[in-house]
Amino acid sequence: TSSSIITKLPIYNVETEEKKIAFTMNCAWSADDIDEILETLRSNEVKITFFVVGEWVDKNPEAVKKIHAEGHEIGNHSNTHPHVNNLTYEQNLEEIKKCSDKIEQLTGQKTILYRVPYGEYNDNVIKVSSENGYYPIQWSKDTLDYQALTGEQMWKRIGENLQNGDIILSHNGTAHTSDSLDMIIRNIKEKGFEIVKVSDLIYKQDYEINNNGTQIKK
């Protein structure tokens, strides 16, 4: 059966029996901590999904290549990080396409994931994503790392009720993400969860998204 992924909501999390969660990192600011982050991920043998802004890609092509070379997934986080709810269908599509083209030029790989800037969306934004081959990805647990939280504070926020199919949001270029990442990953694993890339967590077909933004297999 061909399934349509047009729905009013992006994917916040996934209903699954498996103890796995996706860890995601948005890249929009500096790239100074990318080497350290990649080293931490490598030493913990974890692959995650990085959502990159096109303008960040322009400034940091080497970082993008390194992320890709390490086997991590690269998703689209728009080209200029605008407030997408104000844009027309065509402008939204251009934001997505430009960023995707930049990723593909550097990595040779097309991306199928789109995370909207600021977590803002409306029906139009979701429609653009799904009609053009992208899964719109939100998150269910937020580290709030961009507010300069310490690792302990971040873990308190996300760790207490971590559940199967959660999608965790983090950012590089913050005060404590790179120095807290090792601890957070170890803690997640200690709770018995496997950390996976977004595309290894979500269902690609025959699914629906409920009113909470949970993706459910049909």
Image: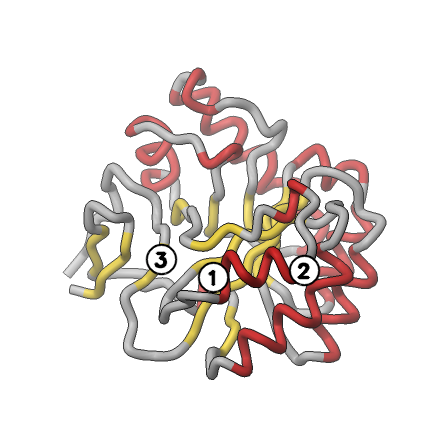
Binning the other alpha carbons within 10 Å of mark 1 as few (below 14), some (14 to 19) or many (20 upward) gives many
Judging from the image, what secondary structure is the residue with disc 2 in?
A: helix
**Is residue 134 among what the camera can see?**
no
* Badge 3 amino acid: Asn
Binning the other alpha carbons within 10 Å of mark 2 as few (below 14), some (14 to 19) or many (20 upward) gives many
**Image position, residue 26 (x, y; %):** 61, 47
| Residue found 29% across the figure and 72% down from its top | 16
Marks 1 and 2, how far apart at CA: 23 Å
Classify the position of the C terminus by image quarter.
Answer: bottom left
Disc assigned to residue 172: none
Considering only vertical position in the picture, is 36 above or below 32? below
- Pointer 3: what residue? 13
- Pointer 2: what residue? 151
- Pointer 1: what residue? 198
Marks 3 and 2, how far apart at CA: 23 Å
Classify the position of the N terminus by image quarter.
Answer: bottom left
| Mark 1 or 2, nearer chain start | 2
* Label 1–label 3 contact, CB within 8 A: no
**Image position, residue 153 (x, y; %):** 61, 56
